[in-house]
Amino acid sequence: MSKTVRGTFYTLVAGTAWGLSGTSGQYLMAHGFSALSLTNVRLLIAGLVLMGLAYLTDQKSFGQIWKDKQSLVMIFIFALFGLFLNQYAYLEAIHETNAGTATVLQYLCPVGILVYTCIKDKVSPTVSEIASMILAIGGTFLIATHGQLNQLSMTPKGLLLGLFSAFTYSLYILLPIDVIKKWGSILVIGISMTVAGLLLLPFSGLSQHQWKFTPDIVMALFGIILVGTIFAYTVFLKGTTLVGPVKSSLLASIEPISAVFFAFLIMQEQFYALDFLGMAMILVAVMLISLKDLLIQRKKDFYKFISKDRDICLGLSYASSYLGAICQKRSIIYVKP
């Protein structure tokens, strides 16, 4: 099996597992869990496991990060405003709507980041970016109203929580960029989840929760913590190393599709034609953004060369399965992404 095929498979499996986690959360909240207590147990257990994985894979970084005060402050901020807020808002949105709808609304995040970067960098959006914004707004309108201007198909609280979940998902992506570059994803996410879980313990009511370990509850906890968090995250990272971050993010867009499927299969949620149309519009909006990034990345990869003497490359040519380069004085080494 080729590297690309394996990476694609891993990423699709991770996206499907994330879709299952939302439905597992919906099931648990329908059987006595609050969104806050469920957020707490998910963050704490997944965080401790990921920290353990980080220790086993890179003990040196695990020991050094605790001496980096600036990184620890950033991790603390990320734990509260990225991880906790996003997980809690997402589960509350599921509680007010359903796993499929809440997941699709959260996928408005890339459009929000696009708007933010256009404003920050003072650049006008391209035609495809404008189209993605229009599709995202139109899709949200259809999901929220079913085309009826005078009424909502969900509670106003559910809609607001879904949109807030998309906003906090943006924070989840943007806040830890620098610290993850420095220390690695698993270590940073593991510590952040654990910190958020420990801080939440006195307020979540988890210690007073009446635990009932029936087979269905155990399976749902297994789905949201082990499959939908630990397994999904590690498999996604493995897939990303094989196919690259842009393509893996695009492939992970299967998450809302799987969330709708599991919500229908497990929770017997009912969806209408306009729901599917709105979901499709949001997914197309995300794909327009992702495909543009993918094309840009491929162009960068095509021209990614290192000159031994820093000479300027004059021409490039592909010949069957290898990359050739014609340079003024020295050879050029192609660096695979």
Image (cartoon, grey):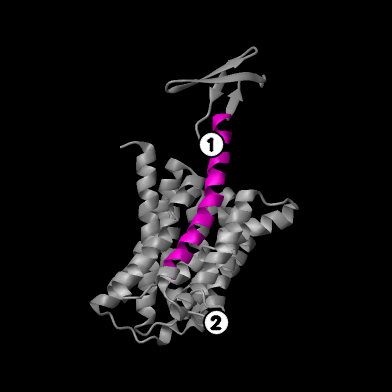
On residue 142, which mark appears? none
* Residue type indicated by callout 1: Arg
Residue 221, position as x, y percentages in the image: 34, 72
What is the chief secondary structure element of the magenta stretch? helix
Residue 299 lies in the magenta-colored region: yes
Residue displayed at 34% across by 65% down: 261
Residue 206 shown left or right of residue 127 in the figure: left
Residues 163 and 46: in front is 163
As drawn, is 257 to the left or to the right of 151?
Answer: left
The residue pinned by badge 1 equals 298
Q: Earlier in the sequence, mark 2 or mark 1?
A: 2
Helix, strand or loop at label 2? It is: helix
Toward the left, the furthest residue is: 215
Q: Distance from label 2 to label 1 (Cα)?
A: 42 Å
Write the residue at 48% across / 43% down: 244
Quadrant holding the N terminus? top left
Instruction: Locate residue 142, reporting x and y percent.
Output: 51, 70
Q: Start and end of the magenta stretch? A: 275-303
Q: Secondary structure at mark 1?
A: helix
Q: Amino acid at mark 2?
A: Pro
Out of 30 and 259, give the one closest to the viewer.
Answer: 259
Camera-side residue: 220 or 179?
Answer: 220
According to the picture, the residue beneath numbered tag 2 turns out to be 156
Above or below — where is 128 with respect to 168?
above
Mark whose residue sits in front, 2 or 1: 2
Q: Residue furthest top?
A: 329
Magenta stretch contains residue 332: no
